[in-house]
């Protein structure tokens, strides 16, 4: 039983220490660099400065109006800065309105994370989706785009840049920053994480130990307060050795011949003896 108690106390504590060490190591890895290397073409980390000729002046057409609508997640009260969940898809729609007199072709749309203090510094590029859709004069088109923020960026603010690339019928290319604001990447915890689970295990083990200790204490107290049993009195039976010296010899002989005869009281025996003498 003592070994069981010791196991219930030591095992949750060891698990908590292991989980804490793992979380601390992960925190150290997250603090190494602001730029994290990712695999795949969909999530490319650039980590380099962009020349002023590229993004300092965004070239866009006066005949085009664009709008953006986030469908997942939805900004609270239309705030410019809102939270994006790390590891969960971000989805939005971009409206493209042609107010001019010539055709426009929407080529691609891309998104990227920028350093919030300097939007010319790329942190992560997302896939450039090709559309190649023609929009006639006085018409409108809607384009959908989605990406997933990397979990390594959780707990940090980034500048989110959504850029639309299109051209007119004359072959002139344009770029328009549909969205260019700071967002917060947050970590969403679903259900029980490891640290909370081990904490519950430790609390459960402590509760079980407390219940067992309380039960043993109550049992010991009950044994102390229980009344002691009274000493047993040994009953002695009647002695079968009867003094027959005072009886007549005839009566004694009769009693010895018939042992099954029920015993009679001395008064009755005296009455019978008197009757025999008469």
Image (spheres, rainbow, N blue to C red):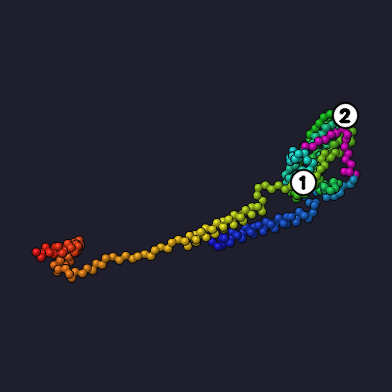
Residue 141 falls left or right of residue 22:
right
Tell me the residue that label 1 is attached to.
184
The answer to which of 81 and 59 lies nearer the viewer is 81
Give the class, few, some or many, for how many residues have Cα within 10 Å of label 2's Cα (few <14, many ≥20).
few
Q: Residue furthest bottom?
A: 245
Give the class, few, some or many, for how many residues have Cα within 10 Å of label 1's Cα (few <14, many ≥20).
some
- In the rendered image, residue 73, in percent from the top left (x then y), is placed at 74, 41
Residue 189 falls left or right of residue 48:
left
Image: magenta residue range: 53-69
The answer to which of 218 and 173 lies nearer the viewer is 218
- In the rendered image, residue 197, in percent from the top left (x then y), is placed at 64, 52
The answer to which of 112 and 23 lies nearer the viewer is 23
CA distance separating discs 1 and 2: 40 Å
- Which SS class for mark 2? loop
Query: Residue drawn at (85%, 46%), measured in percent from left and top?
Result: 119
The answer to whether mark 1 and mark 2 are in CB contact below 8 A is: no
> Residue 248 lies in what quarter of the image?
bottom left
Q: Residue furthest left?
A: 278
Residue 139 falls left or right of residue 233:
right
> Residue 131 lies in what quarter of the image?
top right
Query: Residue drawn at (87%, 30%), measured in percent from left and top?
Result: 100
The answer to which of 74 and 136 lies nearer the viewer is 74
| Residue 6 in sight from this viewpoint | yes
- In the rendered image, residue 153, in percent from the top left (x then y), is placed at 76, 49
- Which quadrant is the C terminus positioned in? bottom left
Tell me the residue that label 2 is attached to.
101
Question: Mark 1 or 2, which is nearer the eye?
Answer: 1
- In the rendered image, residue 261, in percent from the top left (x then y), is placed at 18, 61
């Amino acid at each position: 039983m003592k070994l069981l108690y010791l196991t219930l106390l030591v095992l949750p504590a060891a698990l908590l220490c292991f989980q804490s060490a793992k979380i601390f190591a992960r925190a150290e890895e997250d603090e190494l660099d602001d730029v994290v290397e990712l695999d795949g073409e969909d999530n490319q980390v650039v980590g380099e400065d962009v020349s002023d000729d590229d993004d300092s002046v965004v070239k866009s057409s006066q005949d085009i109006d664009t709008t953006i609508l986030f469908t997942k997640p939805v900004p609270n009260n239309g705030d410019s800065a809102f939270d994006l969940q790390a590891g969960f898809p971000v989805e939005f729609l971009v409206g493209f309105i042609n107010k001019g007199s010539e055709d426009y072709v929407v080529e691609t749309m891309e998104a990227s994370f920028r350093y919030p203090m300097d939007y010319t510094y790329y942190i992560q590029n997302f896939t450039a989706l090709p559309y190649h859709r023609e929009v006639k004069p006085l018409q409108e088109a809607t384009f959908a785009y989605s990406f997933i923020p990397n979990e390594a960026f959780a707990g940090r603010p980034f500048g989110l840049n959504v850029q639309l690339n299109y051209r007119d019928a004359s072959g002139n290319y344009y770029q328009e920053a549909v969205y260019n604001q700071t967002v917060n990447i947050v970590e969403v915890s679903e259900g029980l994480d490891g640290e909370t689970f081990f904490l519950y295990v430790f609390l459960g083990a402590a509760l079980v130990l407390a219940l067992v200790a309380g039960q043993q204490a109550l049992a010991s107290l009950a044994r102390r307060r229980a009344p002691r049993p009274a000493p047993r009195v040994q009953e002695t039976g009647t002695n079968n050795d009867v003094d027959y010296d005072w009886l007549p010899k005839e009566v004694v002989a009769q009693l010895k011949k018939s042992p099954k005869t029920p015993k009679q009281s001395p008064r009755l025996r005296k009455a019978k003896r008197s009757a025999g003498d008469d």
